[in-house]
């Protein structure tokens, strides 16, 4: 009996034949792991801690399976080596970005507000002004009550930065410089 040439060229990873079911399973793992990792990083403290910590590593499991799958296809001459290596590189890069705690695309946990609020009470007006600016750009709504109180600061620069930060926190809606209006908006 002559062996079937199609079966000889069938890609395999460590002797296990790569079938379309594997591709579907890898795609499902990609969607679930990437969505979970991005969601837990953009919503810290919502999911259990073990889910937050394991989410990037589940994505790494996808990357390893994906890399093995692509290498098997390349060795069977069924896929472009350049495309495979580029896709694996992008997947590894995404994994590394998931490990970055200070990524600009990731909302910081609310407990990071405490040092910022302390800086809003600093004796140096330049520090208060800069802290107000940062609170606005970071969208720290927890700092809003202190920013409202800074509208009465003796330094005009601090008042201006506090007002600008409150406008940012209010999605661009300007309630003016009247403290009662801002207190009603951010109790």
Image (tube, rainbow, N blue to C red):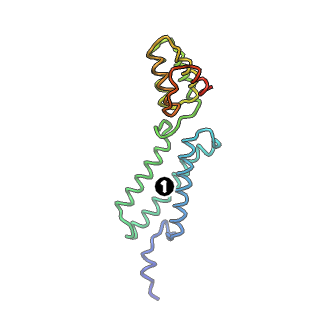
User: Looking at the rendering, which quadrant does residue 42 occupy?
Assistant: top right
Q: How many marks?
A: 1
Q: Label 1: how many residues lie within 10 Å, few (<14), some (14-19) or many (20+)?
A: many
Residue 31 spot, x, y in % from top left:
53, 56
* In the rendered image, the vertical position of residue 58 relative to residue 72, given as above or below: above
* Residue at screen point 42% across, 75% down: 9
Q: Name the residue furthest bottom.
A: 1
Where's the C terminus, which quadrant? top right
State the image coordinates of residue 56 (x, y, percent, origin top left): 53, 47
**What's the residue at 65%, 43% (across, down)?**
48
Q: Which residue is mark 1?
A: 63
Residue 3's x, y, as percent? Answer: 45, 84
The quadrant holding residue 40 is top right
Q: Nearer the viewer, residue 2 or 30?
A: 30
- Residue at (51% x, 70% y) in the render: 20
Residue reaching furthest right? 48
Name the residue located 53 percent from the left edge and 46 percent from the top edge: 38
Q: Is residue 86 left or right of residue 123?
A: left
The x, y position of residue 75, in whole percent, is: 39, 67
Question: What SS does tag 1 mark?
Answer: helix
């Amino acid at each position: 009996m002559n062996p079937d040439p199609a079966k000889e060229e069938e890609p395999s990873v460590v002797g296990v034949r790569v079938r379309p079911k594997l591709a579907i399973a890898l795609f499902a793992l990609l969607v679930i792991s990437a969505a979970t990792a991005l969601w837990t990083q953009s919503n810290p403290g919502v999911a259990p801690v073990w889910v937050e910590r394991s989410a990037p590593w589940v994505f790494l499991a996808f990357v390893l399976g994906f890399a093995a799958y692509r290498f098997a296809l390349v060795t069977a001459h069924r896929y472009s080596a350049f495309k495979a290596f580029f896709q694996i590189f992008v997947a590894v890069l995404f994994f590394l970005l998931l490990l970055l705690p200070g990524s600009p695309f990731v909302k910081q946990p609310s407990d990071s507000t405490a040092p910022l609020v302390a800086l809003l009470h600093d004796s140096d007006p330049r520090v208060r002004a800069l802290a107000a600016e940062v609170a606005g750009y970071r969208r720290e709504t927890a700092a809003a009550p202190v920013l409202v109180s800074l509208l009465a600061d003796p330094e005009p620069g601090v008042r201006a930065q506090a007002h600008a930060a409150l406008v940012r926190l209010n999605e661009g809606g300007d309630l003016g410089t009247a403290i009662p209006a801002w207190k009603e908006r951010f109790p």
